[in-house]
Amino acid sequence: MHQTETTDFAVDPIEPLLGVDRAAHLLGISAKTLRDWVQYRKIEYVKVGTRVMIRPETIRNFVAQNTRRAEAG
């Protein structure tokens, strides 16, 4: 293993992947809705064998990208 690979892992460890039920719960939507989003490629996902998993970073990014700021005044 190269030194940079070790350093990168230490700085950016892999977070546990979330199952569809847990990811949907965090987003406040149904698991069916999240499965639909996966099917229509509205959200990124990871395929692990036959399971669909969601990276925690994907949830954070999705929330950030879909947050609408209030107008001042």
Image (cartoon, helix red, strand yellow):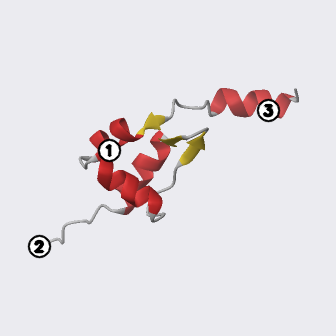
- Dot 1, how many residues are within 10 Å of its Cα: few (below 14), some (14-19), or many (20+)? some
Q: Mark 2 belongs to which amino acid?
A: Gly
Rounded to the nearest angstrom, the CA distance separating label 1 from label 3 is: 32 Å
Q: Looking at the image, is mark 1 or mark 3 earlier in the sequence?
A: 3
Instruction: Give the number of the mark in front: 3 or 2.
Output: 3
Query: Which part of the image, by quadrant, shows the N terminus?
Result: top right
Residue with the mark numbered 3: 5
Taking the spot 31% from the left edge, 51% from the top edge, the residue there is 32
Q: Residue furthest right?
A: 2
Q: Are marks 1 and 2 in contact (CB under 8 Å)?
A: no
- Dot 2, how many residues are within 10 Å of its Cα: few (below 14), some (14-19), or many (20+)? few
Residue with the mark numbered 2: 73
The percent position of residue 46, horizontal first and vertical second, equals: 56, 45
Q: Residue furthest front?
A: 50
Taking 47 as reference, is 61 above or below it? below
Taking 9 as reference, is 67 above or below it? below
Q: Does residue 28 appear left or right of residue 61 in this picture? A: left
The answer to which of 48 and 26 lies nearer the viewer is 48
Q: Mark 3 belongs to which amino acid?
A: Glu
Rounded to the nearest angstrom, the CA distance separating label 1 from label 2 is: 34 Å
Q: Looking at the image, is mark 1 or mark 2 earlier in the sequence?
A: 1
Q: Looking at the image, is mark 3 or mark 2 earlier in the sequence?
A: 3
Taking the spot 41% from the left edge, 47% from the top edge, the residue there is 59
Rounded to the nearest angstrom, the CA distance separating label 3 from label 2 is: 49 Å
Q: Does residue 50 appear left or right of residue 42 in this picture? A: right
Instruction: Give the number of the mark in front: 1 or 3.
Output: 1
Residue with the mark numbered 1: 24
The percent position of residue 53, horizontal first and vertical second, equals: 50, 41
